[in-house]
Amino acid sequence: MKAPSLRKSTRMGEDKNENEETVETTKPEEEQNNNHIKETNKPTETNKYIEINEQKQTQNGQKIIEPNREEMAHYVQNLMNSGLSLQSNIIKDEMLLPDSKTVARFSPIWKQTLASMAAICLTFTAGLTSGYSAILLPQLKASDSSIPTDESTASWIAAMAALPMAPGCLIAGWLMEKFGRRNAHYMVSAPFLLGWILIASANNLALMLLGRFFTGLCVGLLGPLGPVFISETTDPKHRGIFLAGISLAIAVGILVAHLIGTYVHWQWTAIICCVFPIISVVLLSMVPESPTWLISKGEIEDGVKAFGWLRGYSDEAKAELKAILEKKKVEDSKPVMTLKQKLISLKSPELIKPLIIMIIFFVTCQFSGVNAVAFYSIEIIEKAVGKGIDHYLAMLVIDTTRTIMSVVACVICKKYGRRPLCMVSGVFTAISMVGLAMFLYFTDGKQTNMTWIPLTCLMTYICAISVGLVPLPWMMCGELFPSKTRGLGSGISSATTFVSFFIVVKTAPGMMTNLGEVVTFLSYGLIALLGTGVLYFILPETKGKSLQEIEDKFKKPKQSIA
């Protein structure tokens, strides 16, 4: 529902009564509330606003469905009582974003899709970064490479992207709190584009390493940014689908990087990757800043406008907006905290509880061996079916499977919620890893005609972990943390996954060499089972809940929101 134009509302008010008195903003709050009650039945600005809405017609002559007079008056009254001027809120969506008048005519779900796609487009670029090493290194090792590369150099090129990821997560937490969620995405787009340009133009090792460093840093920066921005710009009903789009974007990015790099030179692949940060900037320019962040920083009017533009004026949206405004009032009524008090406040249960949950979730995901198995899947297949398989074809099959299951996750998370998806994913991840370990133990490297068993275990593992343990932590790190520490909490928890990623990938070769594949895969399966068991008791269900509801539940010492 769109509010009428401010200019139209003002002009009609002048035609009816040029000398009509307005509510004085300088009156005491108690006197203002009394005046609002007395003037309910007068031809006030509120009533004129309602009359305009009742008279609005569509181009085909059908009357637009608007809230009744009582509901609209109640909504406007709430906005007045929140300390906002009525005049500043009675404007069209188009006036919020003068450069996006076409977009402003769309329904809230399309606007939320646009905002989510702006973040997801950058996340897709992160997926391209993750998949780029697999096609870059073989080409650099070729005899005709412009950058001579041996095994040691190749390891540095691969590691340079992973090195700044964890610090990037922590920096992102500060960036999004200081400058805003949308502005932080703008800031990430520039070094992302620069990194790909450096890689595309690299004719020596130094430029290549610098480009990889920038792109890796941006992957880390996007870790907490995307989930938080999407969580704060979408409604509870559709939030799960949009958040699941983050993991889907990464999976598609890896697949596209492998697909393009299989047939295209690595420099042209980097040039193609330059396009997506630019697209993201264009999309970001068409959407407002996160309303939750704006309101938390005292920019109440801009926050209310942004909320209305993104969420519309349904009963659920109005209730959520009212809760956010009331929370802001309570926070403003408290005395300004000293630095020591701020540090003490970080021990609050609404931050510590979700932080512990998310760290356990991310650690369970990574130590279930998701990246180690992906890196060594070719070797596993070779042990099962013998040598001579096409590595690129096998890689594309695995990538495609991961992408398909990410799409499945987007669909079923909306219907079944986070907890059931996590439990099913964790159990089947554990079963498939234990099954693979048992097969390798009983065959002991001997050829067998039961090659379908390890292949089934491997594909079950990829499907199970891709539908739950991989996407869910990224979805929920944008949901669980309170608004005032959402940047800090999501930054710390997402940094955990990159540290765990580094440890798992670094230790996997040594474990397989010294302990053997059986012990390695059995360990991954048991960790998946143990982590799932712990999450069963502590993981909350956030499906259909507003961010404010989730935050309020964590404040209660012994009450679960599962």
Image (tube, helix red, strand yellow):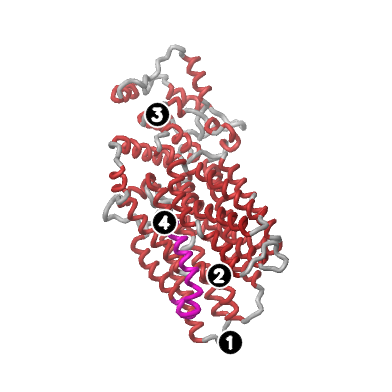
Q: Amino acid at mark 1?
A: Gln
Magenta highlight on residue 511? yes
Whole-number angstrom distance, CA of label 2 to CA of label 3: 55 Å
Q: Position of residue 479 (x, y in %)?
A: 42, 51
Query: Is the C-beta separation of discs 4 and 1 under 8 Å?
Result: no
Q: Amino acid at mark 2?
A: Phe
In the depicted structure, whether residue 169 falls above or below residue 503: above
Q: Nearer the viewer, residue 321 or 465?
A: 465
Label 2 Cα crowd, 10 Å radius (few <14 / some 14-19 / many 20+): some
Q: Amino acid at mark 4?
A: Ser
Read off the residue under disc 1. Answer: 447
Query: Is the C-beta separation of discs 3 and 4 under 8 Å?
Result: no
Query: Is the C-beta separation of discs 1 and 3 under 8 Å?
Result: no
Mark 1 vs 2, N-terminal side:
2
Read off the residue under disc 3. Answer: 84
Which image quarter: residue 82?
Answer: top left
Q: Looking at the image, which residue sits at the far right?
A: 144
- Residue extent of the magenta highlight: 493-522
Question: Which numbered tag is attached to residue 493?
Answer: 4
